[in-house]
């Protein structure tokens, strides 16, 4: 595979392992020991959760960079280019660095079969080691306990939220999912749980692990101010500017990040100024991202019920939204009816199309699901996103267009609209 282009490496990886997802740490840990037999030197922050992981990684990365640290961040999936997954000091690494890492991994894996995600995880860790980053911020791909990023012991962990998603892999109730996500916690190490309601399964696992967890609403709190917001934990309080990323739930994410950074102050000192500057700079694409005005066009990765509720809440705060057009498609394994039901009170016209992925929900099933969830729905079916997105040119300047349903939908929208990621 030497001297292959990145696209060739990725195509080969997609065919290498018999399944796209194969949860478990044995194979990936074995290859990692061969690749890097010594200790992993960067401070490791692992971020798990159903929604909000990407935003939390963005906040952590930006704040720590403003504090003077060299950072490496690993997220998934990507929106437009694979390189988005692996960043050093805020910038996506180039094809050459990723291909060199892939070559090293392939050379030492011998007969061990790795999934596409496992290859990417090992590549990120290899690059972070070579680049001598101070802090590695790792987003869990799926679950936590058996996810590839969990092969490293986290020095600190953050769990952003817990919802019903990936139930075929993680379990069909919140407590089962919570236990999987709590798998990133380590004994004696600091952690934060960002939601005010904590599933019993998470508490049980956290207590059994012996991690030092700070819980939202119990150990720390945050509140709106006229020109910003206030974070407080014990006798310590900070007056902070609103994050650059919009959406009410972003304060929940930001507060959890600030809390985690306070818990690791002895090892990673961060000033209030760095926190303020990082909050102002941090951006995760397609998180209620406005990409056009007149009409207003928003792109969002919402693909489960909780994210759809948050998206509906954000749209409801727009004072002059006019008619709302939703350009929408989803995968067959996602809760389409629940997602549509959350947006039904806000959306005036549904513009539907079928994704090209093998996981896609076919257009008839998608249309049927929308009708079940929104009996009065006005539906327009399109052949693809390129066709659906033309409505932007036909809308009244005071109307609103929201494009959502998955990372694939959001990524394609950003590409078609020529938005830099």
Image (cartoon, rainbow, N blue to C red):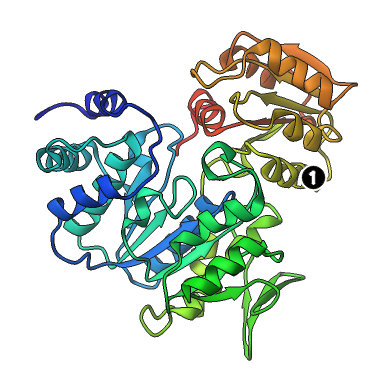
At x 48%, y 75%, the residue is 211
Against 314, is 404 above or below?
above
- Whether residue 213 is visible, yes or no, is yes
At x 62%, y 26%, the residue is 330
- Label count reads 1
Q: Secondary structure at mark 1?
A: loop
At x 70%, y 29%, the residue is 336
Residue farthest to the right, as pictured? 376
In terms of depth relative to the viewer, which is nearer, 35 or 72?
35
Quarter of the rendering containing residue 343: top right
Q: Is residue 130 left or right of residue 388?
A: left
At x 64%, y 80%, the residue is 219
Q: Is residue 106 left or right of residue 236?
A: left
In terms of depth relative to the viewer, which is nearer, 309 or 325?
309
Residue farthest to the bottom, as pictured? 235
Q: Is residue 146 left or right of residue 132?
A: right
Quadrant where the N terminus is found in the figure: top left
Q: Position of residue 363 (x, y in %)?
A: 66, 12
Quadrant where the C terminus is found in the figure: top left
The residue that label 1 is drawn on is 318
């Amino acid at each position: 595979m030497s001297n292959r282009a990145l696209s060739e490496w990725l195509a080969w990886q997609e065919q290498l392992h018999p399944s796209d997802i194969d949860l478990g740490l044995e194979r990936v840990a074995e290859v990692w020991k061969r690749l890097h037999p010594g200790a992993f030197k960067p401070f490791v922050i692992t971020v798990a959760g159903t929604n909000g992981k990407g935003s939390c990684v963005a906040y952590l990365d930006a704040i720590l960079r403003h504090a003077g640290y060299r950072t490496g961040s690993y997220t998934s999936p990507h929106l437009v280019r694979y390189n988005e997954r692996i960043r050093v000091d805020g910038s996506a690494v180039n094809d050459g660095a990723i291909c060199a890492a892939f070559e090293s991994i392939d050379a030492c894996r011998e007969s061990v079969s790795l999934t596409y995600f496992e290859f990417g995880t090992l590549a990120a860790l290899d690059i972070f080691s070579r680049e001598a980053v101070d802090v590695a911020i790792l987003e869990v791909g799926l679950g936590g306990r058996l996810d590839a990023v969990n092969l490293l012991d986290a020095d600190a962990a953050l769990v952003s939220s817990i919802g019903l998603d990936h139930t075929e892999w993680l379990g069909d109730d919140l407590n089962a999912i919570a236990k999987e996500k709590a798998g990133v916690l380590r004994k004696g190490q600091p952690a934060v749980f960002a939601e005010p309601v904590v599933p019993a399964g998470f508490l049980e696992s956290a207590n059994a692990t012996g991690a030092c967890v700070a819980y939202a609403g119990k150990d720390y709190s945050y509140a709106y101010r006229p020109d910003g917001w206030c974070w407080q934990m014990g006798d310590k309080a900070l007056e902070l500017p609103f994050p650059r990323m919009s959406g009410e739930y972003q304060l929940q994410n930001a507060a959890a990040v600030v809390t985690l950074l306070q818990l690791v102050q002895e090892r990673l000192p961060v000033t209030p100024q760095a926190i303020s500057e990082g909050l102002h700079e941090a951006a995760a694409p397609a998180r209620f991202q406005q990409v056009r005005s007149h009409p207003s066009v928003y792109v969002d990765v919402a693909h489960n019920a909780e994210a759809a509720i948050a998206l509906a809440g954000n749209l409801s705060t727009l004072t002059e939204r006019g008619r709302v057009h939703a350009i929408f498609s989803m995968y067959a394994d996602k809760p389409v009816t629940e997602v549509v039901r959350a947006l039904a009170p806000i959306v005036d016209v549904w513009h539907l199309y079928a994704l090209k992925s093998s996981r896609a929900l076919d257009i008839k099933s998608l249309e049927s699901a929308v009708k079940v969830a929104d009996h009065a729905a006005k539906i327009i079916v399109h052949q693809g996103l390129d066709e659906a997105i033309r409505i932007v040119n036909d809308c009244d300047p005071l109307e609103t267009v929201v494009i959502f349903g998955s990372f694939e939908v959001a990524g394609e929208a950003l590409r078609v609209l020529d938005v830099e990621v």
